[in-house]
Image: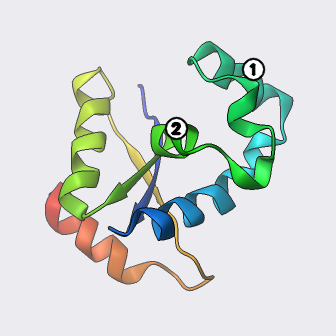
Amino acid sequence: MLAPEQMVVVETDPEKARSVGRKSLAIYLRAPNYQRNLLTLGFDESDWADPNNASERLVDGLVAWGTPEQIKVRVDAHLAAGADHVCIQTLRDDTRMPLDEWRAMAEVLN
């Protein structure tokens, strides 16, 4: 079974969406194992030189953001590439449960 995880931010404002993505990516960007994997994916150390301020290229490459329909395109790309299931990790700019975002994504993914 192949089941990749896709971080998602249901937000159409690029600055807001990337800010949420950067905040969530920061912990991963400090870990050498993640850094090595990112190198194999075509990113370079300049993309995470400051883990709290990842490059737009890195954020956009790792975090699907936009409308639920735009995010679905990214999820569908995983399935088209052979994934059996795609786990979406819904990110927010606060600590509340992403109930509205889950509902919105469920409507387009079902």
Mark 1 — residue? 36
Query: Which residue occupies the foreground of this view, 64 or 3?
Result: 64
Vertical comparison of 29 with 20: above or below: above
Task: Please identify the quadrant where the N terminus is shown.
Answer: top left
Instruction: Answer left or right for 5 relative to 80.
Output: right
Query: Which residue occupies the foreground of this view, 89 or 65?
Result: 65
Vertical comparison of 88 with 102: above or below: above
Spatial CA span between label 2 and label 1: 17 Å
Residue 82's quadrant in the figure?
Answer: top left
Measured as percent of width and height from the top left, residue 64 is found at 39, 50
Vertical comparison of 82 with 77: above or below: above
Q: Amino acid at mark 1?
A: Arg
Instruction: Answer left or right for 3 relative to 30.
Output: left
Q: Secondary structure at mark 2?
A: helix
Q: Residue at x 24, y 62 (%)?
A: 68
Q: Secondary structure at mark 1?
A: helix
